[in-house]
Image (cartoon, rainbow, N blue to C red):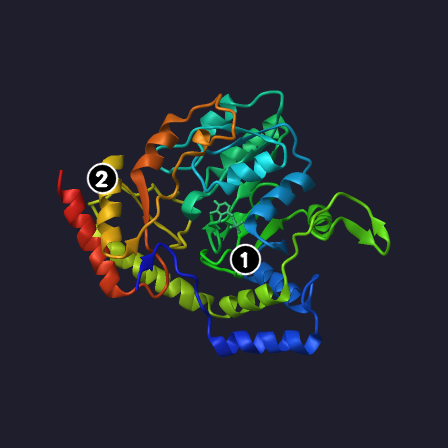
Amino acid sequence: MAVHVHKPYQPDLHRYQSYIHRIYESGWLTNNGPLVQELERRLCDYLGVRNVVAVANGTLALMIAFQALEIRNEVITTPFSFVATTSSLVWNGLKPVFADIDSKTLNINSEEIERNISRNTSAIVPVHVFGNACEVETIEEIALRYNIKVVYDAAHCFDIKYRDKSLLKYGDASAISFHATKLFHTIEGGAIITDDDDLANRVRKMINFGITGPDRVGLLGINAKMNEFEAAMGLSNLDEIDIILGKREEVYDRYMEGLKNLVEMPKQNEHSTNNYSYFPVILRDEDTVLRLQKTLNEQDIFPRRYFYPSLDELEYVERDTICPVSRDISRRIMCLPMYPGLLDNSQNTIIDTLRKTIGKV
Ligand SMILES: *Cc1c(COP(=O)(O)O)cnc(C)c1O
């Protein structure tokens, strides 16, 4: 069987069925149903955050956060991320201004943020890449000084703690993804997470067309609701979250054992925990990446070039900022298959192939 970079976690079928059974009993399929509400409550507890508003996907979580915070004009963001970080800005009519990344952590470089601030800047949208915390205190300080908003793309940050509390508590809001390939998933889904109750209330109306009462539409909204079947999957996965995390850690440790000292990896923020959601390796050049990819593909193993291309190279963005560090890293990085239940056999093949490929000059 082919091995891909991710494999969606499938919780116990009977467990999922018992939640589905409740949907059939209530007849409530969507529109803030009982399972969505239960999922939001349990996620608040589990993550240690104040408000979780479940939505249809992580991209909409970003787009709605930008709308709800009235972000306009220019937004400083990172070029090293999944395309949704930038496309969600452009789709909202905002102009992404790319601040280059730190070559070691792969997160947005705080000095570059400040260098790119103009009078049109209204927000910063950093990404905690691969769940590794950004320099959140420095970013907060910059945002306060220039009176601009911060929305974190926290798509990779389920269960990450920073200085012993949830990383999701930083910024005006965090957007998380619960896509099937993420550590915790609801098939498709995501959430807006914020300590600001007013913001959470506004977001709740926005995700349901801006409806604020019977026969009343009080603000511009969209349809971004999570449905009950997705919430059922989320609740099932949350029931099994310790298994998911434990199995990921095993896979991670085994890679570390086989690959330590052989490959460069992003430098971990010392105050941030790791949720083992990705296993990125930084290789010496793009040619090595392509050779490795080809050799693995021939063995039915499909790592992914996360994140390539660097988003400052996108066709649809104005190319007035060039980010050499991000461009260099994005050509040399690859994420190895990483999911609970990755077979030892497959993992040994991946490790052996890496050892051979990297050994060859
Ligand atoms: C997955 C991801 C998204 C998008 O989330 P979806 O739920 O797939 O819409 C956004 N940003 C980053 C960094 C991601 O990895």
Q: CA distance from mark 2 to mark 1?
A: 34 Å
Q: Name above or below for residue 80 compared with residue 293.
A: above
User: Which numbered disc covers residue 288?
Assistant: 2
Secondary structure beneath disc 1? Answer: loop
The dot on residue 22 is: none
The residue at the far left in this view is: 360
Image position, residue 305 (x, y; %)? 35, 44
Q: Which residue, given by chain and number where applicable, does mark 1 sit on?
A: 188
Q: Residue at x 54, y 57 (%)?
A: 188
- Of 126 and 163, the residue lying toward us: 126
**Front residue of this view, candidates 48 and 202:** 202
On screen, residue 262 versus residue 187, left or right, reads left
Total marks drawn? 2
Amino acid type for the residue under numbered disc 2: Thr
Q: Is mark 1 within 8 Å of ligand 1?
A: yes
The amino acid sitting under disc 1 is Glu
Element at label 2: helix
| Spot occupied by residue 300 in the image (x, y as percentages of width and height) | 27, 57
> Mark 2 or 1 closer to N-term?
1
Q: Confirm whether residue 271 shows in the render.
A: no
- Residues at badges 2 and 1 in contact (C-beta under 8 Å)? no
